Image (cartoon, helix red, strand yellow):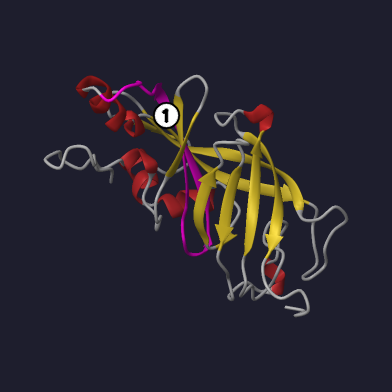
């Protein structure tokens, strides 16, 4: 739901195209060509990181026409979920060069100007992708993360930073490239670099820039 703080009498807008999940907020990056890319995480154990790329371009200014247009910009575009790939790790073992790899944004749902939508998930109609977005992420094989609480695009360097809070329920068998610790009680910070600096493309590179906790603690 988006509210217009400049107009207390305005009606809040529900952005169903962004999918339904336990997000704490959505943070945006405006591309040089005007598309709005919204990043968010589903703040639960073994849930996913998402982005939404608008089909329309942002309108500059604070006039009524621009405000009305921009309040609707998140109604039209494509919702993606992240899949991370990299060097396989053993629990507690740091691979050469650190925890890093490549990834891709997998499309889930495209919403059009007239409100109709197209599902990109086999066996799931559009309304199910919008409402049961977690299930859609399961079906396309997205990477289950350690509570992605906050996803922040950096307006200076163009990279995206993800606060992964913790996941004490992850077992040694569930350790993967981007979530390298079982019973992770301390969390980590993930950096995502869009290919060619373009936030609208599906490919990216990633690395863990901070593994939280006391370095003298083997956990």
Residue at the outermost left position: 9
Which part of the image, by quadrant, shows the C terminus?
Answer: bottom right
| Image side of residue 182 versus residue 125, left or right | right
Q: Residue at x 58, y 59 (%)?
A: 145
Extent of the magenta region: 38-62
Taking the spot 79% from the left edge, 57% from the top edge, the residue there is 88
Residue 105 placement: quadrant: top right
The residue wearing badge 1 is 54
Seen in the picture, residue 1 relative to 178 is either above or below; the reply is above
Vertical position of residue 37 compared to residue 160: above or below? above
Q: Position of residue 32 (x, y in %)?
A: 52, 22
The image shows residue 6, relative to residue 70, as above or below, that is: below
Inspect this view and state whether residue 72 appears. no
Report the predominant secondary structure element of the magenta stretch.
strand
Helix, strand or loop under label 1: strand
Q: Please state the horizontal and vertical placement of residue 29, each as a whole percent of the image.
A: 49, 35
Q: Position of residue 71 (x, y in %)?
A: 28, 32
Tell me what residue is drawn at x 23 percent, y 39 percent: 4
Q: Quadrant of residue 111?
A: top left
> Which residue is more in the foreground, 36 or 60?
60
Residue at (67, 68) in percent of width and height:
212
Q: Is residue 38 visible?
A: yes
Query: Per the image, is 51 magenta?
Result: yes
């Amino acid at each position: 739901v988006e509210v217009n703080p400049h107009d207390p009498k305005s009606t809040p807008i529900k952005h169903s195209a962004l999918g339904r999940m336990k997000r704490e907020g959505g943070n945006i990056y405006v591309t040089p060509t005007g598309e709005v890319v919204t990043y968010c995480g589903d703040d639960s154990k073994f849930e996913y990181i998402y982005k939404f790329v608008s089909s329309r371009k942002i309108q500059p200014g604070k006039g009524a026409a621009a405000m009305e247009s921009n309040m609707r910009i998140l109604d039209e575009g494509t919702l993606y979920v992240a899949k991370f790939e990299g060097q396989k790790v053993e629990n507690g073992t740091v691979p050469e060069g650190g925890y890093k790899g490549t990834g891709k944004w997998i499309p889930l749902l495209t919403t059009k100007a007239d409100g109709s939508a197209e599902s990109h998930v086999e066996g799931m109609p559009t309304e199910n992708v919008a409402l049961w977005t977690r299930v859609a992420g399961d079906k396309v094989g997205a990477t289950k993360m350690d509570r992605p609480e906050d996803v922040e695009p950096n307006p200076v360097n163009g990279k995206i930073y993800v606060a992964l809070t913790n996941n004490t329920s992850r077992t040694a068998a569930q350790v993967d490239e981007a979530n390298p610790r079982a019973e992770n009680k301390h969390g980590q910070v993930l950096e995502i670099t869009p290919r060619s600096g373009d936030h609208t493309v599906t490919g990216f590179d990633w690395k863990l820039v901070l593994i939280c906790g006391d370095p003298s603690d083997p956990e």
